[in-house]
Image (cartoon, rainbow, N blue to C red):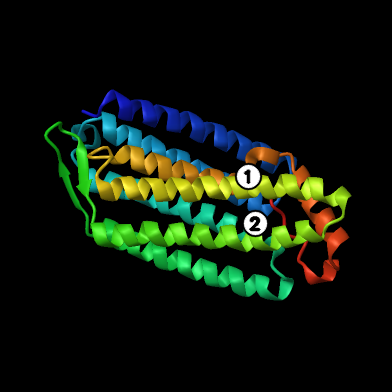
């Protein structure tokens, strides 16, 4: 059976996932935009993914009719839906400061890279070895090479998004008048902090996995990566939508609004 530490991490991740879902629903109700609804769907599947992870870690294989492969496949489907939607939302949000003529091209390129990363993850799961361990639990051994490539590509996607948002934002910040700097600074810190948390989560989790720190406690690795991923795209610090209005008005006050697609929203 899993250790008390692992169960504690899983329990905390479920609570945090439920709280994140609440924030997303609240944001969607306050500002009914398509991107907010997409984030709600991503959060739902992230929470379902964590519930499956908790179930596989605490209920024996006979609970699933000894059909571990089928139920784990359902779990992985939930994972890929949440992950791709979550990173997709983050791509849309962080590219808002790119000049309008480059936004579409940038988003398409990042989505293509995301799909390439997903293909490596799907390969890893397709060729995994599923079995019942000595404790009677469903267990799997993933194809490590493609799984590592999948994680690292996602990390570099976050790294790219971080730069794509922060560099233009700092340019705006340096050119802004004093009345605009305060609001833009708050928004820059909020988004940068969220993306940085996701980046650090993926990086730390990957390093720990490679160096064997997690040992057999892969649940901790997955929980950390999943939560960092979903919170990066939630941008829950200003879920009431005020960040969107502040950002758009600030950009308009600094640059010609025709140069930027300020109709895009961050929340």
Quadrant position of the N terminus in the picture: top left
Q: Image point 66% across, 44% down: which residue?
A: 190
- Whole-percent x and y of residue 58? 27, 29
Depicted 160 relative to depicted 77: above or below: below
Nearer the observer, 128 or 7? 7
Depicted 120 relative to depicted 16: above or below: below
Res. 137 image quadrant: top left
| Mark closest to the chain's N terminus, 2 or 1 | 2
Element on which disc 2 rests: helix
Nearer the observer, 181 or 39? 181
Residue 267 visible in rendering: no
Q: Image point 84% across, 54% down: which residue?
A: 249
Q: Is residue 211 left or right of residue 243?
A: left
According to the picture, the residue beneath numbered tag 2 turns out to be: 93
According to the picture, the residue beneath numbered tag 1 turns out to be: 235
Residue 94 visible in rendering: yes
Q: Is residue 73 left or right of residue 128?
A: right
**Counting other residues with Cα less than 10 Å from the Cα at mark 1, is it few (<14), some (14-19), or many (20 or more)?**
many
Q: Image point 40% across, 27% down: which residue?
A: 11
Res. 172 image quadrant: bottom right
Nearer the observer, 120 or 153? 153
- Residues at circles 2 and 1 in contact by the CB criterion of under 8 Å: yes
Q: Is residue 63 left or right of residue 22?
A: left
- Whole-percent x and y of residue 106? 60, 71
Depicted 4 relative to depicted 240: above or below: above
Q: Image point 37% across, 46% down: which residue?
A: 205
């Amino acid at each position: 059976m899993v250790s008390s530490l692992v169960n504690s991490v899983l329990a905390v991740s479920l609570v945090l996932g439920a709280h994140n879902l609440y924030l997303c629903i609240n944001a969607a109700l306050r500002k009914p935009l398509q991107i907010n609804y997409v984030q709600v769907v991503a959060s739902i599947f992230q929470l379902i993914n964590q519930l499956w992870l908790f179930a596989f870690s605490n209920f024996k294989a006979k609970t699933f009719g000894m059909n571990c492969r089928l139920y784990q496949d359902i779990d992985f489907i939930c994972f890929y839906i949440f992950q791709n939607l979550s990173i997709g939302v983050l791509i849309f949000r962080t590219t808002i400061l790119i000049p309008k003529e480059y936004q579409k091209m940038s988003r398409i390129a990042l989505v293509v890279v995301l799909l390439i990363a997903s293909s490596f993850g799907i390969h890893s799961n397709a060729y995994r070895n599923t079995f019942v361990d000595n404790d009677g639990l469903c267990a799997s051994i993933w194809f490590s090479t493609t799984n590592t490539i999948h994680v690292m590509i996602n990390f570099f996607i976050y790294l790219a998004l971080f730069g794509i948002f922060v560099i233009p934002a700092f340019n705006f910040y340096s050119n802004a008048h004093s009345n605009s700097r305060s609001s833009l600074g708050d928004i820059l810190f909020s988004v940068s902090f969220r993306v940085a948390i996701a980046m650090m989560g993926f990086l730390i989790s990957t390093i720990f996995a490679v160096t064997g720190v997690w040992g057999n406690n892969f649940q901790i690795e997955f929980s950390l990566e999943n939560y960092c991923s979903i919170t990066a795209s939630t941008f829950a610090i200003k879920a009431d939508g005020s960040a969107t209005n502040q950002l758009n008005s600030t950009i308009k006050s600094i640059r010609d609004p025709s140069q930027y697609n300020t109709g895009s929203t961050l929340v």
